[in-house]
């Protein structure tokens, strides 16, 4: 297996369900593009609500990574960016 390239461009999809005033629900999908996969991973783990990590999909060079895999890339010793201490608490 080849090493993950944290420097490649990446797209991050996340989904959340929003309650409307009525009893129906609306799904909302957000997409963000990042110059580096490391930035997308850090955003997903540190800046998004922890409950949404499971709804995330990271696309890097034709490969797709979801919640647990994104967390694994963040926790890897090869992760090139500084981590916030409070991100470990969000598991």
Image: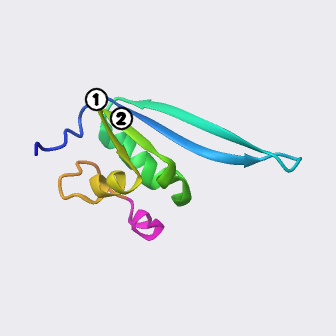
Q: Quadrant of residue 4?
A: top left
Residue toward you, 37 or 22: 22
Kindly identify the residue that appears in the image at 62 percent across and 46 percent down.
16
Q: Are discs 2 and 1 less than 8 Å apart at CB?
A: yes
Kindly identify the residue that appears in the image at 59 percent across and 36 percent down.
29
Horizontal and vertical percent position of residue 15: 57, 43
Q: Cα distance, mark 2 to mark 1? A: 7 Å
Q: Secondary structure at mark 1?
A: loop
Horizontal and vertical percent position of residue 28: 65, 38
The residue that mark 2 highlights is: 59
> Is residue 57 within the magenta segment?
no
Residue furthest right in the image: 22
Q: Which residues are magenta?
A: 84-91
The residue that mark 1 highlights is: 62
Horizontal and vertical percent position of residue 25: 76, 46
Number of other residues with Cα within 10 Å of mark 2, as a class: few under 14, some 14 to 19, many 20 or more? some
């Amino acid at each position: 297996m080849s090493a993950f390239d944290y420097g490649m461009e990446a797209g991050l999809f996340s989904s959340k369900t929003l309650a409307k005033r009525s009893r129906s629900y609306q799904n909302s999908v957000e997409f963000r593009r990042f110059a580096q996969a490391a930035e997308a991973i850090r955003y997903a783990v540190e800046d998004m609500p922890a409950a949404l990590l499971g709804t995330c999909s990271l696309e890097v060079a034709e490969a797709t990574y979801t919640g647990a895999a994104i967390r694994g890339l963040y926790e890897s010793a090869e992760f090139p960016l500084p981590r916030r201490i409070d991100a470990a608490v969000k598991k």
